[in-house]
Structures are given as structure tokens and as C-alpha cells.
């Protein structure tokens, strides 16, 4: 990212969703309420807060899972956050599963390209009978799009399964944010992401339970962007945070 581009990004960046003073005041007041119930001590706590805010459920703070290790190979909740923030600041591509997830990811605070998987792989879906989202992920992976990218799955369990297969076959996203929602295979798809992420050292943020969705995935991705902005501004040193 050039110095001029960084300046442009930071000038535009305020709150990720709010643009007016009233909206920013509402957003800050809302987060102040969340902080009464969710710890505010670590990087991972920021994401627990964001999940609670997104889902409107205080108990959701206990449902996030962080997969990653520190430099000594020890489990580290902050590992996927650091990896994601660094990916944002080197302008990695943000690849979502569907349009809704992409629409929820802010265009401010970064210079990353945003792409969606859905809409690719139509022929593969037709030939194999797999879902359009799974085929789309496989098609983009064939093009190398997921390598070193910020991979976001907010809706489709089959997309998460396909992404897990890609990782198992050698693809290495910079970070995965996977919160597919539903009653059919959603829980299992996130378990699969956690398994391959741990095995192949791919940082990941997921959740347990049946809930989740595109809004949550976008909110967590936006928080990665927020952390990246704090790093650029000198307000946060990733090396000292856990």
C-alpha cells in the first residue's frame, strides 16, 4: 500500500458502518453496552464483542473459536486476528461465498479487492450436481484466488466444505472466517474448517452451534479491517497483543 493510498483510506475511515455523527454516536453507545457484558482485554475480546453486537446475543461471546498458533507453536486466539490484519494491510483479496457476505464487508479502511465466489463454476455444478456455492469455491480455487486471500464463508455450509477440501489439497488462505448458518451440515462444516485449519496451520475464526450467517461473517471481517486500521495508525502493535 502506498503512502498516498494509506492516507486516502484513513481519511475515509471512521466507524465501519456509520457515516454521520449521530450514527457514530449510536454505534459507540451500543458497543459501550456490549463492553459491560464482554471482557475488553485482548484482541480476541474485540471479536467476541463484535459477534455479540452483530447477533444481539450476549451469550454468543462464548461461541467463537479461534484456530492458530503463536511463534512457539502454542494455541493462540490472537493468531488469526494478526494474520487477518496483516493480510488487509498488504491488500489481500477478500473472497466471500455469496453476495450478501460481500455486501456486508465495508469498502472503507482498506484497499483490498472484494470478490464473491457465487456466479462461478456453473458448468461444474451442472456436471456434478454439487451446489453452486461449492462449485464456485472450487472454480475460484482452480484460478488461485484463495491463495493468501481472506476467505469468508457466511452462508453456505457446502462452500465451507469445499474450502476445507481446497486447504487439504494445498491452498493456503491468509485467514479464514467461516460462520455458515443452518440446520443441515452447518455445524459439521465449521468443524471441518477447524480441523483442516489446525492440521495445515491456516488461521481461522469460526463459531460453534447452529447460528451464524453472512452478517456475522461480515462483522468479523470488518473487525479485521478495523484492527488493520489501528495498526496503520500506530494505535496497536500486533506483536505485543494476545
Image (spheres, rainbow, N blue to C red):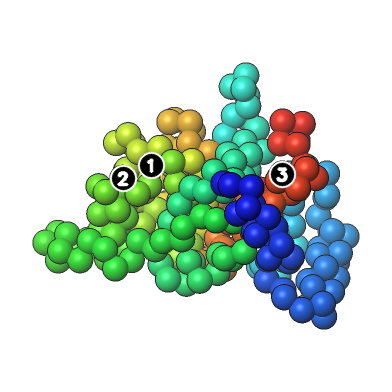
Name the side, left or right, on which 43 lies relative to 33. left
Tag 3 secondary structure: helix
Q: Does residue 143 appear in the picture of this structure?
A: yes
Residue at the disc numbered 2: 144
In the rendered image of this protein, does residue 119 appear above or below residue 83?
Answer: below
For the residues labelled 2 and 3, say whether their Cβ atoms are less than 8 Å apart.
no
Q: Residue at x 39, y 63 (%)?
A: 116
Q: Residue at x 54, y 43 (%)?
A: 90
In the rendered image of this protein, does residue 79 appear above or below residue 46?
Answer: above
Judged from this view, the residue extending furthest toward the left is: 127
Residue 96, by quadrant, is bottom left
Tag 2 secondary structure: loop
Please state the horizontal and vertical placement of residue 142, each as a whole percent of the image. 25, 47
Label 2 Cα neighbours within 10 Å, binned few <14 / some 14-19 / many ≥20: few
Residue at the disc numbered 1: 147
CA separation, marks 2 and 3? 28 Å
Please state the horizontal and vertical placement of residue 51, each as a whole percent of the image. 67, 60
First in sequence, mark 3 or 1: give its number: 1
For the residues labelled 2 and 1, say whether their Cβ atoms are less than 8 Å apart.
yes
- Disc ID at residue 231: 3
Residue 124, by quadrant, is bottom left
Please state the horizontal and vertical placement of residue 170, each as a whole percent of the image. 32, 34
- Disc ID at residue 99: none
First in sequence, mark 2 or 3: give its number: 2
In the rendered image of this protein, does residue 62 appear above or below residue 217?
Answer: above
Q: Residue at x 11, y 61 (%)?
A: 127
CA separation, marks 3 and 1? 23 Å
Q: Nearer the viewer, mark 3 or mark 1?
A: 3
Q: Residue at x 30, y 53 (%)?
A: 140
Amino acid at each position: 500500500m502506498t503512502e498516498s493510498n494509506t492516507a486516502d483510506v484513513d481519511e475515509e475511515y471512521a466507524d465501519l458502518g456509520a457515516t454521520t455523527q449521530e450514527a457514530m454516536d449510536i454505534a459507540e453507545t451500543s458497543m459501550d453496552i456490549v463492553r459491560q457484558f464482554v471482557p475488553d482485554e485482548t484482541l480476541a475480546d474485540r471479536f467476541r464483542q463484535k459477534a455479540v453486537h452483530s447477533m444481539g446475543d450476549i451469550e454468543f461471546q462464548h461461541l467463537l473459536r479461534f484456530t492458530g498458533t503463536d511463534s512457539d507453536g502454542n494455541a493462540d486466539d490472537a493468531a488469526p486476528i494478526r494474520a487477518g490484519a496483516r493480510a488487509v494491510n498488504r491488500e489481500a483479496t477478500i473472497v466471500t461465498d455469496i453476495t450478501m457476505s460481500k455486501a456486508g464487508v465495508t469498502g472503507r479502511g482498506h484497499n483490498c479487492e472484494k470478490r464473491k465466489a457465487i456466479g462461478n463454476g456453473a458448468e461444474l455444478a451442472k456436471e456434478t450436481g454439487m451446489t453452486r456455492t461449492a462449485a464456485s469455491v472450487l472454480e475460484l480455487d482452480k484460478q488461485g484466488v484463495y491463495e493468501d486471500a481472506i476467505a469468508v464463508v457466511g452462508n453456505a455450509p457446502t462452500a465451507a466444505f469445499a474450502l476445507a477440501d481446497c486447504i487439504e489439497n494445498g491452498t493456503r488462505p491468509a485467514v479464514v472466517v467461516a460462520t455458515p448458518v443452518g440446520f443441515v451440515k452447518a455445524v459439521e462444516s465449521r468443524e471441518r474448517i477447524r480441523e483442516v485449519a489446525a492440521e495445515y496451520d491456516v488461521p481461522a475464526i469460526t463459531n460453534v452451534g447452529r447460528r451464524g450467517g453472512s452478517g456475522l461473517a461480515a462483522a468479523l471481517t470488518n473487525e479485521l479491517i478495523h484492527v488493520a486500521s489501528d495498526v496503520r495508525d500506530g494505535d496497536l502493535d500486533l506483536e505485543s497483543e494476545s
